[in-house]
Image (cartoon, grey):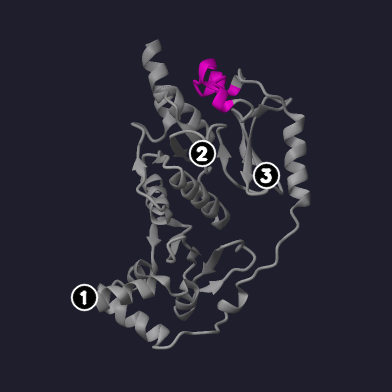
Amino acid sequence: MVMNDTELRHFKQYDFRVIASRMGYQLDSGKSGGNSFVLKGGNGDRIVTRLGSNGEWAYFNTGDTSDNGTILDFVQRRSGESLGHVRKAIRAMIGTQAITFSPIAQSLDLPSKSTTDYRKKAQAVWNSAQWMPAATYLVEHRGLVLKTLGDPRFFDTFRVTNKGAVLFPHFDQGGMCGFEYRSESFKGFGRDCHKGLWFSRNCRTAESIVVCESQIDCLSHYQLHGGGYAYVSHNGDMGPKQIGLIESVLVKAHGRNAKVIIATDNDKAGEGFYELFASIAPMELQRMTPISNDWNADVLALKFLDSW
């Protein structure tokens, strides 16, 4: 049993990219970056993988977030076989000696891209907008109240453009990297900018951090539940860069004993995000779901009942 457990741990720590390459997956260097790598399969799969802080490789499927886990899950999902057969398959692929070269492994160090232009653009758009807690779109169309929008944790975490659209900034390790527009008639991400994470202002000090799929869900969760929560939004579908940013949030929270609550949507995708985050977290995560599909739908339903 000890030998078997040791072997499974070895499989999980073995370079995921090498095993995936033996199964027909190829590195998409244009989409990979930092410590996250995108692999493309012949069946149209797009897999994001990275080496976790626990020394084990983890992955998720960008088209099906329930398809995630370690190399064991990856091989078993694609073979449909038992764990015993998965062991044999992986043994055959990696052999008894370490593989020192492969078409994937030779592309580990990817060239960094210039970040000047998109950061300048994001900052310029942000500077042209104004902090306005009584944003018409958020109040009239999203049911959010001034007490929520004016809370210090949300101070200047969104702005309003001269056309009335609400602007939410995105951040990565280098600072502001992009922005998202929200209005009654339009929802979209800034052109030529990069997707990161959105944060409330108290993330470094709060005892509990809530992770939602959108900024409006973060604001809605606070309106519904109050408390001393900090908030992080990943804005729906995630790329490898955002996975790394979320992992950084989890590691830092764990380092100061803060709790992390995954409050993604009440649907299959939301549950998939929870499972993904749990697979890369260095601690146990809590799960919290809205009654409706998302937290803003709960806010709007409650507003309707109050006015009925």
The residue under label 3 is which amino acid type?
Gly
Q: Can you say which quadrant of the picture contains the C terminus? A: top left
Residue interval drawn in magenta: 137-154
Q: Position of residue 59 (x, y in %)?
A: 44, 63
The residue under label 1 is which amino acid type?
Met
Residue 56 position by quadrant = bottom left
At horizontal 47% and vertical 33% (from top left) the residue drawn is: 206
Instruction: Give whichever of discs 3 and 2 has the lower sequence position.
Output: 3
Front in this rendered view, residue 76 or 187: 76
**Of tags 1 and 3, which is closer to the observer?**
1
Q: Position of residue 179 (x, y in %)?
A: 65, 40
Front in this rendered view, residue 234 or 227: 227
**Residue tagged by mark 3?**
175
Instruction: Give whichever of discs 1 and 2 has the lower sequence position.
Output: 1
The chief SS type of the magenta part is helix
- Local SS, label 1: loop
Vertical relation: 261 (above or below) 222: below
- Local SS, label 2: strand
**Residue tagged by mark 2?**
232
Front in this rendered view, residue 248 or 213: 248
At horizontal 51% and vertical 39% (from top left) the residue drawn is: 232
Q: CA distance from mark 1 to mark 3?
A: 48 Å
Task: Check if residue 61 falls in the magenta segment.
Answer: no
Residue 240 position by quadrant = bottom right
Q: Position of residue 17 (x, y in %)?
A: 50, 73
Horizontal relation, residue 129 to residue 45: left or right: right
Q: Are marks 3 and 2 in contact (CB under 8 Å)?
A: no
**Residue tagged by mark 1?**
1
Q: Identify the residue at the far bottom of this view.
A: 96
Q: Identify the residue at the far top of this view.
A: 307
- Local SS, label 3: strand
